[in-house]
Image (cartoon, coloured by chain):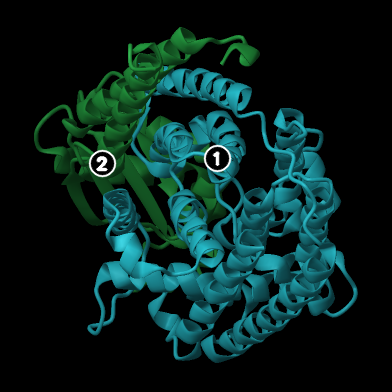
Chain colours: A green, B cyan
Amino acid sequence: MTRSGIGKKGIAALLIALLVFHVVHIYTAWAKSRIEIVEAVYDVPPILGVEARRAPQSLELILNNRLERDQQILPGFRPSVWQGNGTDRIHVSFAARMPHPEQTLNRFSTDLYASFRSSLAPAGPAVACSCTSSASSVSGDGAGLPRLLSWNTRFDPWFKPLDILSLAILLGALLLWTRSGDEKHSPDH
Amino acid sequence: MVFIAGAFAAALINVLVALALSFHLNVGEYYDISMMCGVLGEDGSACRAGALNAGYTMLAGLAICLTLGFAFNAKAGRPAVRAVNEQSAFGWCLLATVVLLAAHVTVEAFGTKELTRIAEITRLSSFISLENLLWPLLLQLMNSASSARLKAMYLSLLLPIVSLSPYRGVLLAVIVFGLGLPVIAWVAQKGLPWRSLLRQRQVIAGFTLALVVVGLLLFTMYAETRERTTEIAVAQTQSESQAKLTQRLAYPLFQAYFAERIAAQEELPTAGGEILHKFRLGSGQNLNEDLYSKVYGDGTVGEMTSLYFGEAVVNSASHPIVWIVAGPLLLVAIWLMLKRFGYEVGTLAGIAIWRGSLGGVASVMPALVVQLVLIMALARRTE
């Protein structure tokens, strides 16, 4: 490998470096798999969904505030809140630090309503609501309380078969490379 | 030609499967599809008819292009090959892979961790883009390698990149272009002397290893499909995984039809703009990002797969079949031209044809140009 300027020992060193970084990747995935992740879906009135779409950062702020107050912020893991398909779904995901995350989820529902109701208030009862979801409770101004549709907790898989396969093939490649060096230096050659 | 034909076959199979699934698809059971049809203001059957029409056009166009590709290749002849300088190529690829993976893994390990796939893709997008540039190159070099040992070495660089990629398509590409098509090419070259082959332990070991690798890759694809979140009303006759996969496979035809309807009403990002965007010289969304935001709302992150058909209806006033033939034919022409000068780039061209069949020629051209320049730089004339 002298033409690339790297050399046989350089190649071996780079393969070892690749192996090390791949092990770090596997370890990171394993560490993440030990964290309980809470996921929830909210059904929200379309008017609230439209307002949230106009100000997505406000959703993150509301969620972060709620998680801080309930001590559910786990350092190193960023909570997510995003709107799903259409304007009547909001998805939430966070790493659970305290037990009973459903209480946090219910309070978040109230926080959402409180935050967006103030921006909807000037519209008053004259606001037309094209709500089609009969499941939403619609108040007089057309913006009802967000409803927690479903929630669950999950853990990421602690290993992926592809990660292990890659590790095995990397080890095999390193062995191949070192053996090819040994064969050339053996007395039989 | 095996890789080019294989790419067309993969694209044709995609469309055929999508057509078969869409024919009797109950649009109302699939939230994404029904929502998209709702944006168009069409009921399920009208939307489905448009999607099927897009599928038939794609089938015809791809079949014509493949036929023309065979015809041009037959006239091209077999010039002497400029083999890649294997000694330096592997060294540089290894260095690039280590640097890229080191950066990616460091950010992943020591930065804030994301809990959703989309958030992770957004945060690590630069690394993912560079990896998407690198893995086809590694596949090409692996397939061109002169020895099984060197092929195994390239595979050892490829798999860590694939394991970091959030896209199932990368896994599929490795299976098809890294394992399936090379085996077909080898069999086509050497014939099928099964009895003598099966006596060779190396061949048996190689096939066994290939089966294990393919099995693990397919299992990974299945597992990742199960984990994907999507809102589908699952019919009693199928599982949630099956429903997710059905929607994923059928949706592109509907997206192609969506592009056609929207293009008739307003200006959409063009192929030229997409190419500038890929080189980071243009701002704004590309065609498939724009289409996605029209369905899911501004500020959402994602892309449609509107196929060559979607690109055709936006960029050409002619019948879409003209673009569907011309687009991949351009890629075939590039491959033939470089082949004439002795450069082996069949895998790269095949991957570009297949990926372009999903998102359009403009989406793959910039990366292909960079990859071809790198291959040409690594090649040397054989004695």
Q: Nearer the viewer, mark 2 or mark 1?
A: 1
Residue shown at 65% from the left, 59% from the top: B359
Mark 1 falls on what kind of element?
loop
The residue indicated by pointer 1 is: B146
| Picture coordinates of residue B291, whole percent (x, y) | 66, 60
Quarter placement of the N terminus of chain B: bottom right
Q: Determine contact: label 2, label 1, CB under 8 Å.
A: no
**Dot 2: few (<14), some (14–19), or many (≥20) neighbours within 10 Å?**
some
- Judging depth in this view, the residue of A70 and A93 nearest the camera is A93
- Tell me where residue A60 appears, x and y as whole percent: 42, 34
Q: Can residue B35 be seen in this view?
A: no
Callout 2: chain: A
Q: x and y percent of residue B305 in the render?
A: 60, 62
Asked whether residue B60 is in view, the answer is yes
Residue ranking furthest to the front:
A188
**CA gap, disc 2 and disc 1:** 31 Å
- Where is mark 2, residue-wise? A160
Tell me which corner region of the image, top left, top right, bottom left or bottom right, holds residue A21. Answer: top left
Which residue is farthest right?
A: B317
Compared with residue B303, is residue A135 higher up or lower down, i.e. above or below? below
Judge whether B189 appears above or below B116 on screen. Answer: below
Q: Which secondary structure, mark 2? A: loop
- Please name the residue shown 38% across and 38% down the image: B163
Quadrant in which the C terminus of chain B appears: top right
Q: What is the three-letter code of the residue carrying label 1?
A: Ser
**Callout 1: residue from which chain?**
B
